[in-house]
Image: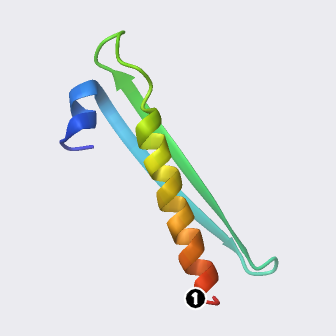
Amino acid sequence: VVEGELKKMYNPYTVTFSFRGDAEKNECIAGWRAEYQPLSPAVAPPEKAKDVALRFMKAIEDFYISSNF
């Protein structure tokens, strides 16, 4: 994260999305990983960011299914 609300609470805050296709099984394995360090002990884990990432992954899945790939 370069700027924004998360940067005010965590440093660093890095998210990695990964996608691995398997043509033989006609499937795609999606992954999400967040690495973060709270700037203060009072800062909670970034659950809201996790929810946004899961909705993003779901949107990609829905697009994939609707596109008949």
The residue at the point 47 percent across, 51 percent down is 53
- Residue extending farthest to the top is 41
Locate residue 22 relative to residue 3 in the image: left or right.
right
Residue sitting at x 36%, y 9%: 41
Spot occupied by residue 39 in the image (x, y as percentages of width and height) = 28, 18
Name the residue rendered at 59%, 79% in the picture: 64
Horizontal relation, residue 38 to residue 62: left or right:
left
Q: Residue furthest left?
A: 3
The residue that label 1 is drawn on is: 67
Q: Residues within 10 Å of mark 1 (few under 14, many from 20)?
A: few
Of residues 35 and 67, the one drawn nearer to the viewer in this rendering: 67
Q: Quadrant of residue 44?
A: top left
Q: Where's residue 47, x and y in %?
A: 47, 34
Please tell me whether residue 55 is drawn above or below residue 5 in the rendered image. Answer: below
Determine the residue located farthest toward the bottom in the rendered image: 68
Which image quarter holds the N terminus? top left
The reply, left or right, for residue 43 in relation to residue 20 is left
Q: How far across and how far down the image is residue 8, in percent?
A: 21, 28
Tell me the residue at 42%/32% (across/down).
Answer: 46
Judged from the image, the secondary structure of the residue bearing numbered disc 1 is: loop
> Label 1 sits on what residue type?
Ser
28 lies above or below 63: above
Q: How many marks?
A: 1
Quarter the C terminus occupies? bottom right
Q: Give the vertical position of 30 relative to 12 (above or below).
A: below
Quarter-of-image position of residue 42:
top left
